[in-house]
Image (cartoon, rainbow, N blue to C red):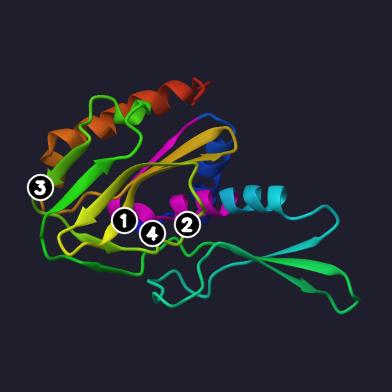
Amino acid sequence: MKNKAVPDSKAREIVRRLKAGKLSLIVLHSALTSRVFIDAMNERTREDAARLVPPGVKTEFIPPKAYKDPLSTDPITPRIEMSRTPDGGRLARVFLPICEITGWREDGKPSEVTTLLPGHPIARGVPKHFELSHTELYLEPFHVPRPDAVIFSETHQGGQRFRSGMLWSVGKGKVFYFRPGHETFPVFFNPNVLRILGNAAWWMGERAAPRKGS
């Protein structure tokens, strides 16, 4: 609710510390729309572009026209489109991620979470499958960079699937997005959800460099 009150300078400062390895970022549920998460995913997209675009090719970064739910038929972001400049040079047009889902539904129906990477520290002690008795439906595609790891997947009652636990590196820092959550459904009382968030906080906290004077 207070997302628009966050200054752009504050979001940039957080991402700068993230890239430097001075902190890690855990993003829960609808915080996918937060400025900090969007800036972090933009930075990861720039890192991916630097790796994927051939040397000598001009790069142009194109932000979304709006940060709102895209249609299921819209082109996926981020993506890279190659073209030619007026003088015949090569141009890589990098479309930055919308960082949004294609739909959602607050129906309170159950979902099943599957642990895809049981050996990952964030999944320590989490069963292969567990149920959320009441939750909100999020629909793929989710417009974010390709994650380094998808630790959890979620299947809703109607068969819809969502990558519900994703991990990225951004510079020297880490970003973990966890979809389950809601302000009225009791998702954050589920012991497996609490274990996942605890695991993430401990593991990512250990990876972050100690603070110096701040």
User: Do labels 2 and 3 touch, CB within 8 Å?
Assistant: no
**What whole-number distance in Å separates the C-alpha atoms at marks 3 and 1?**
19 Å
The residue that appears at 42% across and 54% down in the rendered structure is 6
Along the horizontal axis of the image, is 189 left or right of 51? Answer: left
Instruction: Check residue 162 in the rendering and tell me which mark sits there, or answer none.
Output: 1
Q: Nearer the viewer, mark 2 or mark 3?
A: 2
Amino acid carrying label 1: it is: Phe
Crowdedness near tag 3: few (<14), some (14–19) or many (≥20) residues, C-alpha within 10 Å: some
Q: Nearer the viewer, mark 2 or mark 4?
A: 2
Q: Secondary structure at mark 2?
A: loop
Q: Residue 59: where, in percent of width, then height? A: 75, 62
Q: Tell which circle, 1 or 2, labels the residue nearer the N-terminal end.
A: 2
**What whole-number distance in Å separates the C-alpha atoms at marks 2 and 4?**
11 Å
Instruction: Check residue 136 in the rendering and tell me which mark sits there, or answer none.
Output: none
The residue that appears at 11% across and 53% down in the rendered structure is 185
Instruction: Read off the residue under disc 4.
Output: 33
Amino acid carrying label 3: it is: Pro
**What whole-number distance in Å separates the C-alpha atoms at marks 4 and 1?**
17 Å
Q: Nearer the viewer, mark 1 or mark 2?
A: 1
Amino acid carrying label 2: it is: Val
Q: Is residue 40 magenta?
A: yes
Q: Nearer the viewer, residue 96 or 121?
A: 121
Q: Tell which circle, 3 or 1, labels the residue nearer the N-terminal end.
A: 1
Q: Residue furthest right?
A: 87
Q: Nearer the viewer, mark 3 or mark 4?
A: 3
Q: Is residue 39 magenta?
A: yes
Q: Nearer the viewer, mark 3 or mark 1?
A: 1
Q: Tell which circle, 4 or 1, labels the residue nearer the N-terminal end.
A: 4
Q: Nearer the viewer, residue 38 or 177?
A: 177
Instruction: Check residue 186 in the rendering and tell me which mark sits there, or answer none.
Output: 3
Q: Residue 53: where, in percent of width, then height? A: 74, 55
Image quarter for residue 140? bottom left
